[in-house]
Structure formats: C-alpha cells, structure tokens
Amino acid sequence: MDAQLRRGVLDVLVLSTLQSEDSYGYKIIKDVKPVLDLSESTLYTILKRLIEEGMVESRSTEFEGRLRKYYHITSKGMKRLMNFNEEWKELMAIYSFINKEGRR
C-alpha cells in the first residue's frame, strides 16, 4: 500500500476508535487488532501526529496507582472522519469503474 494512503487510513482508524469514547494506548491496539496488527511504536507515532494536528487531545488520569494517558477526539478529528467517509465513497466509485466487468 502507498505510504501516504496507509498513513491516512491509519490516522482515521485510530480516530474511529475514539469517536464513541476516550481510550488509552493498549485498548486502542486491542480494539483495532481484528482489522490490523498495530504496534505500540506505530500507534504512539500516530497519536503524537494527531495531537499536533489538533485532532486528538490527551489527559493523564490515575488508574490503579499509576498514571494512564487517555486520548479524546476533538471536533477537528470528527470532521476528519466525516471527510474520510466522503472521500471513501468517491474512491469506491473509482474502484468500481476500474474493476467493472468486461473491462479486463
């Protein structure tokens, strides 16, 4: 997969895990595992980028005597998800056109 496309899809994948509730690193990895095996280093690189772009915010909370960092999607992150859905519809139309029966 093209590196830029993969990056964009991974960003949206992480954002989608945060749209219903705030979450933390290990849980995000666990949530996306059925779709993609995501390493911790890759996840934290994505989260750092999303925070820098204003799509995600983080906060630390004590949990069982330790600090746990939780991530929260912002309105900018939600907008990115909506835009991705529109872009995906366009991409699927192109895919369907390319793979139309009889074109091969």
Image: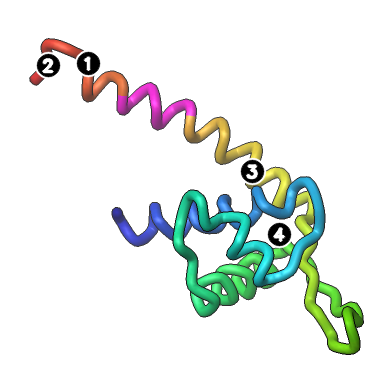
Which residues lie in the magenta part?
89-95
| Residue on which the image places disc 4 | 55
Q: Is the magenta stretch mostly helix, strand or loop?
A: helix
Type of residue at label 4? Met
Query: Residue at the location (39% across, 27% down)?
Result: 92
* Mark sitting on residue 81: 3
Q: Which of marks 2 and 4 is nearer the N terminus?
A: 4
Q: In this view, does 25 lie above or below 68?
A: above
- Alpha-carbon span between mark 3 and mark 2: 33 Å
Query: Residue at the location (22% across, 24% down)?
Result: 98
Q: Pointers 1 and 2 in contact (CB under 8 A)?
A: yes
78 left or right of 9 in image: right
* Mark sitting on residue 15: none
| Residue on which the image places disc 1 | 100
Q: In this view, does 70 lie above or below 88?
A: below
Q: Which of marks 3 and 2 is nearer the N terminus?
A: 3
Type of residue at label 1? Lys
- Alpha-carbon span between mark 2 and mark 4: 41 Å
**Helix, strand, or loop for circle 3?**
helix
Q: Earlier in the sequence, mark 1 or mark 3?
A: 3
Most foreground residue, 50 or 32: 32
- Alpha-carbon span between mark 1 and mark 3: 28 Å
User: Which quadrant holds residue 31?
Assistant: bottom right
**Helix, strand, or loop for circle 1?**
loop
- Alpha-carbon span between mark 1 and mark 4: 37 Å
- Discs 1/4, front: 1
Q: Pointers 2 and 4 in contact (CB under 8 A)?
A: no
94 left or right of 75 in image: left
Q: Where is residue 67 in the image (x, y as percent from the top left)?
A: 84, 85
Mark 1 Cα-neighbour bin, 10 Å: few <14, some 14–19, many ≥20: few
Mark 4 Cα-neighbour bin, 10 Å: few <14, some 14–19, many ≥20: many
